[in-house]
Image (tube, rainbow, N blue to C red):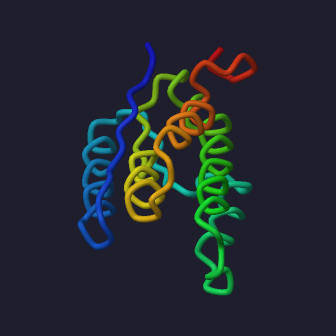
C-alpha cells in the first residue's frame, strides 16, 4: 500500500516543528512506519544546498538563484528520500515543501508563478520520464 505525504507549512514560529513532533509521537505510539524530514534538506546533498540558502554571507543571492536552489534541494530530497519512503508504505511528514516556494519566492520575491509551477512539477518528479516515480 502506498504511503501518505503530510506537509506542515506556515510562517516562522507558527508551530510547524511542534506539530511534526506531536504527529511523530502519535505514530510511534501506534508503531506506524513513518519518515520525518524537512525542506530544504533531508539528504546530504539537499542539506548542503540548505547551508548555502541560509548562509548570511549569501545575502546578495538573486531571487532567481534562490528559486533554483530550493528546487535543486527539492528534487534531490524527493527522489532520494520521499518517493522511496512512500513506495515503502510509510507516512512521510515534511516540515515545509513546495507551498513555501509560492509564499516566499512567488509572493515575497514576486517571481513568476508560471515558472514556479513548471519548476515545482519538475522538482517533485511529477511527469518526469526518468524519475523514481515513473
Observer-nearest of 103 and 45: 103
Q: Quadrant of residue 21?
A: bottom left
Q: How far from the left and from the top, in percent, is residue 42?
A: 59, 53
- Position above or below: 11 against 42: below
- In the picture, the quarter occupied by the C terminus is top right
In the image, 45: left or right of 61?
Answer: right
Q: How far from the left and from the top, in percent, is residue 33?
A: 42, 34
Q: Residue at x 68, y 49 (%)?
A: 72
Q: Quadrant of residue 20?
A: bottom left
- Position above or below: 86 against 15: above
- In the picture, the quarter occupied by the N terminus is top left
Q: How far from the left and from the top, in percent, is residue 90?
A: 45, 30
Q: How many marks?
A: 0
Q: Residue at x 40, y 33 (%)?
A: 5
Observer-nearest of 70 and 110: 110
Observer-nearest of 32 and 51: 51
Q: Residue at x 25, y 55 (%)?
A: 22
Observer-nearest of 25 and 66: 66
Amino acid at each position: 500500500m502506498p504511503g501518505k505525504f503530510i506537509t506542515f507549512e506556515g510562517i516562522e514560529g507558527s508551530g510547524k516543528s511542534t506539530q511534526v513532533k506531536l504527529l511523530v509521537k502519535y505514530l510511534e505510539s501506534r508503531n506506524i512506519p513513518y519518515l520525518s524530514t524537512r525542506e530544504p534538506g533531508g539528504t546530504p546533498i539537499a542539506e548542503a544546498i540548505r547551508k548555502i540558502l541560509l548562509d548570511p554571507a549569501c545575502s546578495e543571492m538573486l531571487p532567481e538563484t534562490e528559486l533554483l536552489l530550493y528546487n535543486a534541494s527539492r528534487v534531490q530530497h524527493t527522489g532520494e528520500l520521499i518517493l522511496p519512503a512512500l513506495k515503502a508504505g510509510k507516512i512521510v511528514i515534511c516540515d515545509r515543501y513546495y507551498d513555501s516556494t509560492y509564499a516566499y519566492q512567488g509572493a515575497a520575491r514576486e517571481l513568476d508563478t508560471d515558472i514556479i509551477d513548471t519548476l515545482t512539477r519538475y522538482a517533485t518528479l511529477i511527469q518526469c520520464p526518468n524519475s523514481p516515480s515513473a
